[in-house]
Structures are given as C-alpha cells and as structure tokens.
C-alpha cells in the first residue's frame, strides 16, 4: 500500500499562493492552444509542446546515471503514465480543441474531479462515496450536460462540438486513471522525473503519430505561434514542478482542491483574449455548477474530518 505525504499547518498556508499560480498557469493553456491551432495541426502542436516541456525539466531531474537507472527500474510505469497522461490525454485534448471554444474546454476539463472521485471510491479505502459527495458529483454532471445541450447537437456545427467535447471527456477519464497509477507509485520514482519523462516520451510519440496522419504547414508560422508554443511548454514544466513540489509537503486532497480554480480562470482568460468569446448565461450557469460541486465536496470532507494525513489505496 502507498501512503500520502503528511502536512503541517504552516505548509498549508504557504502553499496557497503557489497553488493559485499553478492553476493560473494551467488555465492559460486553453487560450494559448486555440491560438496555436490556427497555424499547426493538433497532434504536431501537442507533440512539440510536451517534448519541449520534458526537455526543459530534464536538467533538474538529477545526474544522467540516476535518470537512466530510474528508467530501467520503472519503465512500465513511465510507459503507462506517458500513454495516459500525455499521449491519450493531450492527443484528445488538442484534437478536441479544434471543435469547441475555450470556455467549453475549460469547463469540461474542470469536471475531471467527477471521474477522479468515482475512481477514488473504488481504489482508496478512506475516500468512500457519501450522500454529500454523490450530490456534488451530480451537480458537476449537470453543468457538463447543460453545456453539451447548449451546443445544439442537432445541427452540423453542433455535432462537431459534441465530438470535440467527447474527446475532451476521454482525456478527463485518462487523466483520472493516470492519477491513480501515480498515487500508487509515489515512492517508486521522483515525481519531477516522472513528469519530465512522461511529457518528453509522450511528446515524441505524438510527433511520430502526427507525421503519419497530419500535413505540416507549407509556410513558416508567424511569431505569435512560437510565442504560444514557448508559453505552453513553460506552463507545463513550471506548473507540474510546482504541483509535484507541494505534493511532498501538504495533503494531496488539500492541494487538489485548488485545481477547481482552473475552469474558472480558463473561462475568464478565454473571454479576455480570444475573439468571439464573451460571457453568456449558460456558460456562467455551467461554471457555477462545477464550482458549486467542488465547494460542496470540500465542505463535506472537512465537516466529516475526511482530510487525513495518510491515504491508503487498494491494489488494482
């Protein structure tokens, strides 16, 4: 069995600005991806982003001999996490982003805790499903369903939107499964090294797939494409580094609570920087449902004293 990292009250306070910074960085990716996709096919763009992000992190992962030793010992874990967390998750994310707008993507990806909660109920003995948690999950599902219905799936454009949202949901499920695998193997490999390897290897595989199925642009992309690519690589490397650092110092459940800020920040940023995207009442309702689901779940957990220093997981 695996154990989570213990926390202190001081660490819980110090993590707040860093958690907010990490969520802000991740939420900016929705708008940056939409900008980059105007100039590069999705799988090629995703592969470039994560290969670059993995290379950025690698110098901070230790000596080459230690890295090679970790790869030999944990190659199966690295391959699975690379497939789930980079190849499948971001392959579907970048393709799906071609058919949905930034606000829809931010909300759907922000509903990921629904899948995580269901998997935690199955594989974590101290994170069982309760009536309060079930209500919060139902509220989150309502937000996603309302968003899907708002895309008018009976029209041709709406069908493509539904396809895009379906691909994003596949990525959400893939990320949830990957989270369980990483939680079970926290002591097997340093989390920053795992992040670097899964992004670098996954990005390289995405580029190989892209060569077979996508056509590269015939002309050099404009400067703002490279700015978008550089920003996305920086976001991945920096946000994952922040998250993995604090996962060793505070409770996992406390840290993950902050991830629910991502859809809120993502929607606001999309409204501010993407042409043609502006607030509407349906999006606000969906965002409120997802945020309300998070709040309900966290209040329920704190009231029942379920946020503990140790988390025990069942074998899969």
Image (cartoon, rainbow, N blue to C red):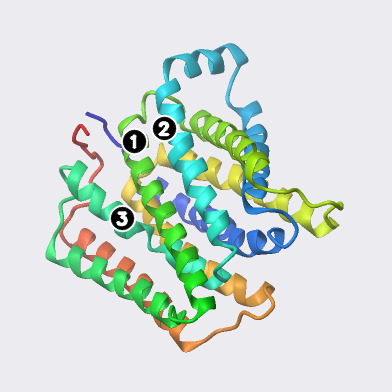
Query: What label sits on residue 115 in the rendered view?
Result: 3
Tell me if label 2 and label 1 are in contact, CB under 8 Å. Answer: yes
Local packing at callout 1 (Cα closer than 10 Å; few below 14, some 14-19, many 20+) is some
Q: Quadrant of the C terminus?
A: top left
Q: Residue at x 16, y 45 (%)?
A: 126
Q: Residue at x 23, y 60 (%)?
A: 302
Q: Quadrant of residue 205?
A: top right
Q: Nearer the viewer, residue 309 or 104?
A: 104
Q: Report the residue marked by disc 1.
A: 181
Q: Report the residue marked by disc 2.
A: 80
Q: Position of residue 50 (x, y in %)?
A: 62, 41
Tell me if label 1 and label 3 are in contact, CB under 8 Å. Answer: no
State the SS at label 1: helix
Q: Residue at x 54, y 69 (%)?
A: 100
Local packing at callout 2 (Cα closer than 10 Å; few below 14, some 14-19, many 20+) is some
Query: What label sits on residue 253 in the rendered view?
Result: none
Q: Residue at x 71, y 51 (%)?
A: 229
Q: Position of residue 216 (x, y in %)?
A: 75, 48
Q: CA distance from mark 3 to mark 2?
A: 18 Å
Query: Mark 3 or 2 closer to N-term?
Result: 2
Q: Quadrant of the N terminus?
A: top left
Residue 31 sits above or below residue 85 on the image: below
């Amino acid at each position: 069995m695996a154990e989570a990292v213990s926390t202190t009250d001081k660490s819980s306070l110090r993590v707040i600005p860093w958690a907010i910074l990490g969520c802000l960085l991740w939420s900016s990716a929705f708008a940056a991806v939409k900008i980059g996709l105007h100039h590069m096919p999705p799988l090629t763009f995703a592969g470039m982003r994560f290969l670059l992000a993995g290379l950025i992190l690698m110098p901070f992962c230790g000596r080459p001999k230690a890295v090679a030793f970790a790869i030999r010992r944990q190659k199966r874990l690295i391959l699975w996490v690379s497939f789930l967390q980079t190849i499948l998750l971001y392959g579907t994310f970048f393709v799906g982003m071609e058919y949905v707008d930034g606000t829809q993507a931010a909300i759907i990806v922000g509903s990921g805790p629904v899948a995580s909660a269901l998997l935690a109920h199955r594989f974590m003995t101290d994170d069982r499903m309760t009536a309060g948690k079930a209500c919060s999950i139902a509220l989150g599902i309502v937000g996603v369903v309302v968003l899907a219905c708002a895309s008018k799936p009976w029209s041709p454009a709406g069908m493509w939107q539904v396809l895009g949202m379906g691909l994003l949901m596949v990525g959400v499920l893939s990320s949830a499964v990957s989270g369980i695998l990483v939680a079970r193997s926290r002591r097997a490999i340093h989390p920053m090294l795992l992040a670097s390897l899964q992004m670098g290897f996954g990005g390289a595989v995405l580029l190989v797939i892209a060569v077979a199925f996508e056509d590269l642009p015939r002309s050099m992309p404009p400067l703002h494409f490279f700015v978008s690519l550089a920003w996305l690589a920086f976001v991945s490397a920096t946000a994952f580094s922040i998250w993995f650092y604090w996962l060793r110092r505070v409770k996992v459940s406390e840290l993950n609570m902050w991830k629910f800020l991502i859809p809120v920040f993502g929607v606001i940023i999309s409204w501010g920087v993407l042409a043609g995207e502006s607030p509407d009442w349906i999006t606000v309702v969906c965002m409120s449902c997802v945020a309300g689901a998070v709040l309900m779940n966290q209040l329920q957990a704190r009231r029942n004293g379920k946020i503990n220093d140790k988390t025990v997981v069942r074998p899969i």
